[in-house]
Image: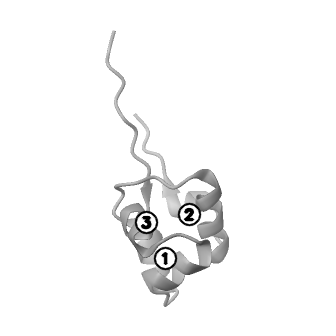
Amino acid sequence: MMAARPTRVTNRIRAVREGAGLTQAELARRVGVTRQTLIAIEQEKYSPTLELAFQIARIFEVGLDDLFQYPEE
C-alpha cells in the first residue's frame, strides 16, 4: 500500500492581485485575514478554506479555477 502524499493547491493570487493594483494588506483586509496569512497563501505554504477561496475570487470577479489549481496526478 502506498503512503498518501499531501496535495498541493497552487494559485495565481499574487499575479491577479498585482494586476488589479491591490497590495497584500488591502486584499487581506478585504477578506478579513492578516497580511501574514495572505503571504502564506500566495507562497503556497497554506491552502485557504473554501470560504476564503470564494471570497478572494469574488473580489477579482473570477472563478475559483482562474485563481486556484489542483494538480492532477
> Which residue matches tag 1?
16
Residue 63, relative to residue 3: is it above or below?
A: below
Tag 1's secondary structure?
Answer: helix
> Which residue matches tag 2?
66
Mark 2 or mark 1: name the one nearer the start of the chain: 1
Q: Amino acid at mark 3?
A: Thr
Q: Residue at x 60, y 72 (%)?
A: 31
Tell me how far mark 2 sits from mark 3, CA to CA.
20 Å
Quarter holding the C terminus is top left
Q: Residue at x 65, y 56 (%)?
A: 51
Residue 61 visible in image: no
Q: Residue 18 sits in which quadrant?
A: bottom left
Kindly check if marks 1 and 3 are in contact, taking CB atoms under 8 A apart as contact: no
Specify the farthest residue to the bottom.
Answer: 21
- Which is nearer the eye, 70 or 36? 36
Task: Tell me if 19 is positioned left or right of 5 in this view.
Answer: right
Q: Amino acid at mark 1?
A: Val
Quarter holding the N terminus is top left
> Which residue matches tag 3?
37
Tell me how far mark 1 sits from mark 3, CA to CA.
17 Å
Residue 57, relative to residue 49: is it above or below?
A: below
Labels 1, 3: front one: 3
Mark 1 or mark 3: name the one nearer the start of the chain: 1
Labels 2, 3: front one: 3
Kindly check if marks 2 and 1 are in contact, taking CB atoms under 8 A apart as contact: yes
